[in-house]
Image (cartoon, helix red, strand yellow):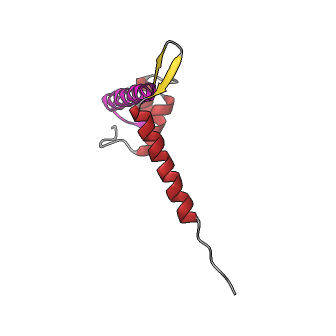
């Protein structure tokens, strides 16, 4: 009897990294899960991957050899800089030992 309930994090990781090496039937047998559960998760993971790729492509606009940063890329850069500054300020702790 196959397991029921949601997939665990380890199972999801395994599926996302091994779906190209095995068939859905083989994956279902290895994880002792229904075939429909495996197919559903793989479809969801593929959609998320496509969405992430599209987001990356939308960060810079190219036209006739020139590349311009979009608003999304600018905001992402600002956010990364802000996080780096916060990390550096929290690490600037000095203690005087006498």
User: Given the current orientation, which residue lies at the most extreme bottom position?
Assistant: 98
Residue span colored magenta: 31-60
User: Between 75 and 21, which is closer to the camera in this rendering?
Assistant: 75
Foreground residue among 31 and 53: 53
Regarding residue 12, the answer to whether it shows in the image is no
> Which residue is rendered at x = 54% and y = 14% of the image?
65
Where in the figure is residue 51, as x and y percent of width and height?
Answer: 38, 28
Question: Of 16 and 67, which appears nearest the observer?
Answer: 67
Residue 25 locus on image (x, y percent): 41, 24
The image quadrant where one finds the N terminus is top left
- In the rendered image, the quadrant that contains the C terminus is bottom right
Residue at position x 59%, y 70% from top? 93
Place residue 71 in its image quadrant.
Answer: top left
Q: Can residue 14 be seen in this view?
A: yes
Residue furthest right as drawn? 98
State the residue at coordinates (44%, 34%).
Answer: 73
Q: Where is residue 2 in the image (x, y as percent from the top left)?
A: 34, 37
- Residue farthest to the top? 64
Magenta residues, dominant SS class: helix
Is 38 a magenta residue?
Answer: yes
Q: Position of residue 78 (x, y in %)?
A: 46, 44
| Above or below: residue 7 compared with residue 49 | below
């Amino acid at each position: 009897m196959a397991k029921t309930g949601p997939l665990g994090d380890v199972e999801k990781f395994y599926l996302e990294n091994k779906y190209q090496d095995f068939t859905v039937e083989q994956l279902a047998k290895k994880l002792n899960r229904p075939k429909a559960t495996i197919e559903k998760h793989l479809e969801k993971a593929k959609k998320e991957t496509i969405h992430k790729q599209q987001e990356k492509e939308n960060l810079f606009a190219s036209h006739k050899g020139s590349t311009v940063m979009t608003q999304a890329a600018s905001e992402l850069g600002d956010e990364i800089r802000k996080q780096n500054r916060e990390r550096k300020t929290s690490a600037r702790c000095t203690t005087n030992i006498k």
